[in-house]
Image (spheres, rainbow, N blue to C red):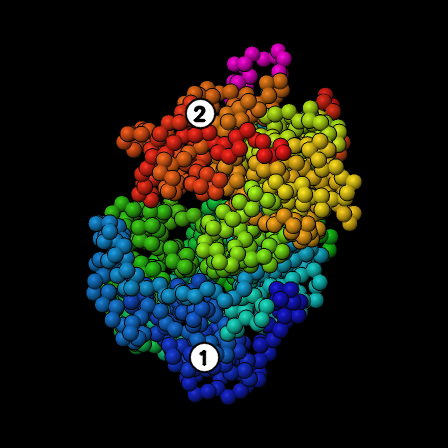
Amino acid sequence: MRIACPFCGERENGEFTYLGDASPKRPNFAVDGGESPERVEDAFYDYVYLRDNVAGVMREYWYHGGGCRSWLVAERNTVTHEFISVTAAPGAGAASAVRAGE
Amino acid sequence: MSGYSRSEPLARTAPMEANVRKGVTPASQSHRLPGDGIIDRRLPLQFSFDGKTMTGFAGDTLASALVANGVKLVGRSFKYHRPRGIVTAGSEEPSALVEMRTGARREPNTRATTQELYDGLIANSQNRWPSLRRDFMSINQLFAPIFVAGFYYKTFMWPAKFWESIYEPMIRRAAGLGKSAELPDPDHYDKAWAHCDVLVVGAGPAGLSAALAAGRAGSRVILVEEDTLIGGRLLSDGGEIDGLDAREWLRGAARELVSLPNVRIMTRTALFGVYDGGTYAALERVSDNVAMPDRHQVRQRIWRIVAKRSVVTAGAIERPIVFPGNDRPGVMMASAVRTYVNRFAALPGKRVALFTNNDDGWRTVETIERAGAHIVAVIDPRHEVPAQYQRLVDTYDLRVLAGVVSEVKGGVDGVRSIVVANDKNGLTQRIDTDCLAVSGGWNPNVGLSCFHRGKPTWREDIAAFVPGSAPKGMATAGAANGELSLSACLREGHGAGARAAAECGAAGKPGEASKADDEVYAIAPLWHVKGKGKAFVDFQHDVTASDVTLAQREGFESVEHLKRYTTLGMATDQGKTSNINGLAIMAEATGRTIPETGTTIYRPPYAPVAIGAFAGHHRDENFHATRLTPSHHWAAKQGAVFVDTGLWKRAQWYPRAGEKDWLETVTREVLAVRNGVGFCDVSTLGKVDVRGADAGVFLDRVYINSFSNLAVGKARYGLMLREDGIVYDDGTTSRLAEDHYFLTTTTAKAGPVMQHLEFCRQVLFPELDVQLTSATDQWAQFSIAGPNTRNLLRALADPSEDLTNEGFPFMGAREVKLRGGVTARLFRISFSGEMAFEISVPARYGAAMAENLMIAGKPYGVTPYGTEALGVMRIEKGHVAGPELNGTTTADDLGLGKMMSKKKDFIGRVMAGREALTAPNRQVVVGIKPIDKARRLRSGAHVIPKGAIPGPQTDQGYVTSVCFSPMLDQWIGLGLVERGRERTGEIIRIHDPLRNEDYEAEICSPVFYDPEGVRQRG
Ligand SMILES: [Zn+2]
């Protein structure tokens, strides 16, 4: 497999580490107020453990540890192993921080 | 570097000119022809086969040299030890497998048909004892009933222990596979990458046309060819192209390709795998054509080729016909007979019979007759002479028999006569012959196009499978695509090459396709001639037609079952000559069509690849990278014993003369630290610079405790969880400036923690202004510990630095100037429980720092100590490490639950609160002391209640870390024990069935030494 890192170009997959499904979003745990403890626990349970096992196109996290150390979000077809797109995670690269709400 | 050479492909075609240079042919080459051939008669080569010295010429393969020397018997078969000869002239060879070379370079199952001859070559036949001609194991033929399909499963089922001790050794000896070397491989192997627009696989007429078209158009082209020469069947069958003799055309094509700077020709390079995203793997046999690679030369090289497009022009393989006795030496594929005669000037037989069911086989007639030998009969089951060959019948007064070969007679030296049966009138006829040329038709090489689970489709007109689909970016052309005529190969190859180049954006003109006359190829399928005696489908695994029908009768009808039950196609040749015949016979037995019967799944490697080639340079000390600490060479000079910690080598202890064992050494080192001063290289800890306005907030989210409130100039111990609430890693982090923290990790987790922190920064919290830099290799870090630490440091540090308890209190962290001007980072942290500092200097000063620590500490008896003494002191202090941070423990299990902040969110916070992770009966860290002070505690031993019967129900935990404590003068340990903290003082039973030990111990506080922590604050 070849993965086109937006920073390094197309590189061999041995340079990358796979993490998995990129769709779950880490729940926001508000210390003061916010969600009830049960709701928060359910939300984290979903986030940590529940994954769809997609036969087809899926968004995935890949880490270019053998290159620029960027976290990438790739759309990949799990049946054909074809990469449809590869984009940088919001905080990847040396650019200035993304301010909340941007 | 043969793969890089531009001039070499021409050099390799040079022997083609050699046919004009006639030399003297030694007498031993009784079957060497005087005429043409692509061998260099000026370069005679001596070789040995089974101890007998023979000669051949440069350009020969081992097989062609054996043919030239009149050798027919080259081996014994795998199961039945039947005499076997040479069947093909290519990489599909199922039969002529020999043991090449001797000693450490001995390699079994080498195909004589692809082994280039070199001076001094030594080869031996396989599977024979005591000699090839007299093989005692051929008695296996008499036991054939036990060796039928599925015999492994049927005969040797019970009892299991008999399998190892009796059956397997017996079968291994009887059913040989050749013997591999028993010494380490002395050769080097290499791995390399290549990139191109168009990869062309196979340099026959189709491949050359494709490479020419794509090369002319301007694409970057790589043309791989497994043979030593380019040309494919042109080298054997000749023909006329563009009005030129094929060899003349070939010379022109080679010249043009070499003149194109964008074309690279790689001969001796076999493509064996097709992978995702246009990645291909090929094996280059760099120096298999010499006795021994040159110094610094590799034996073989694996190429990973990345290509935008590929054109597979891998040709076709002629298939045998399954008839009784078809494995007798001297029964050879018709195309191979032509190759030996036309390319190698070696005559497989003087009185050749030809058995063919298709027009192509008929080419053999002219080859043999022109070589001065004789075609004794042509046997064609079609009952009709092909129109285009009618003239041969008259020219050579041919005896043409309508029918089939039903029997082959002969001895170990091969075929002497055959019996031809007329399938219409049942009459038989015996014909004397010394070579039977067989053609059952051609199977396009569909393997590469089917590697991505592609299914080939059946083409009735050629009675063969052709590619049904191909992996993305791949096209097939020529014989590999089922187009078997020369004209079609040239046309299709050119078209595919031009298309591939255009798809890659090449703007140039591909030129005209070369032309040849159209030929007719007609075939009447013939798979199996029934009769008395074994008729072989798979020569290498000794699978017969009756094995296939037996499998069918026993219900193994699916091709995948057939394969596993009979082992058809599972030998090193992967059934290149046998699979289609096997499934055709199965189709016949089940009354299904061949496409209904289907093919097994095609998987790489297409051809055998040595494990050494896959390993490349990654073996022995280069198996993985080795990381050395900055003081490594200094430590080695001190006589340190090193231990592997991940990729690192760390000093484990520093033995001194007269010390009787490691324990004495380690005990001395511990006492030296506790009573004086010692130092230890701790540079292997992961180090991360964390900078930015939000650095503190970031650390608050990744650690369970707070860091935003850490004062500048202070260090703090931190604990990280995984998001599921389990402890991930620990270490101290210091605040060097308002927006600058220096974070450390454990040695083992340095890489993974960096990756995790980057995930948190880039994915989870991109809104934070923070940057991370791995600094593990930038800093040499030493732990200096013991009551004299401050005295030692005063000798090192600039006198202006205040190192008093007030000026540099416990958990202080700041830069200090050293005498001589180097700036160091100094941290007052302690793993040993002693008054201690850790000092960081740029890594290049690491060795000098070790030297200077020795000089500055000399008055105090400074002692370098290793990881073992470090471990002893951390156990005495109850500090947790790897064995306790084992991926199942929570912060509370480790006694660190109080560190978990309630005022903030952090990774793992919510999931750490789950019921099971906060259950009162969890196993938690405790100290363990054997009651008998002389008893050695061992890690891994189980903890069970006193008086309980050992078993899963009574198991309450285990001992995680142990050491001999010089301070307590006994073995002590840490353990994870159910409700352990409530049970201080309880006597428990230590049960160790692995070492057969059972004794009592006391649960105690994990802090064995200086529980108030007075010493480290002093
Ligand atoms: Zn990258």
User: Would residue B713 be found to the left or right of residue B97 on screen?
Assistant: right
B77 and B156: which one is in front? B156
Name the chain letter of the residue that bears numbered label 1.
B
Reading the chain from its start, which is encountered first: label 1 or label 2? 1
Q: Residues within 10 Å of mark 1 (few under 14, many from 20)?
A: many
Which residue corresponds to mark 2? Answer: B981
Picture quarter with the C terminus of chain B = top right
Residue B248: say if magenta. no
Q: How far apart are labels 1 and 2 at the CA level?
A: 78 Å
- Identified at 25% across, 71% down, the residue is B136
Q: Badge 2: few (under 14), some or many (20 or more) residues near its Cα, within 10 Å?
A: some
Between B911 and B793, the residue placed more toward the observer is B793
Q: Is residue B598 visible?
A: yes
Magenta run includes residue A43: yes
Pointer 2 chain: B
Q: Indicate the amino acid at tag 1.
A: Phe
Query: Residue tagged by mark 1?
Result: B47
At which x and y percent is residue A98? 73, 27
Q: Is residue B28 above or below residue B844?
A: below
The region drawn magenta spans A29-49
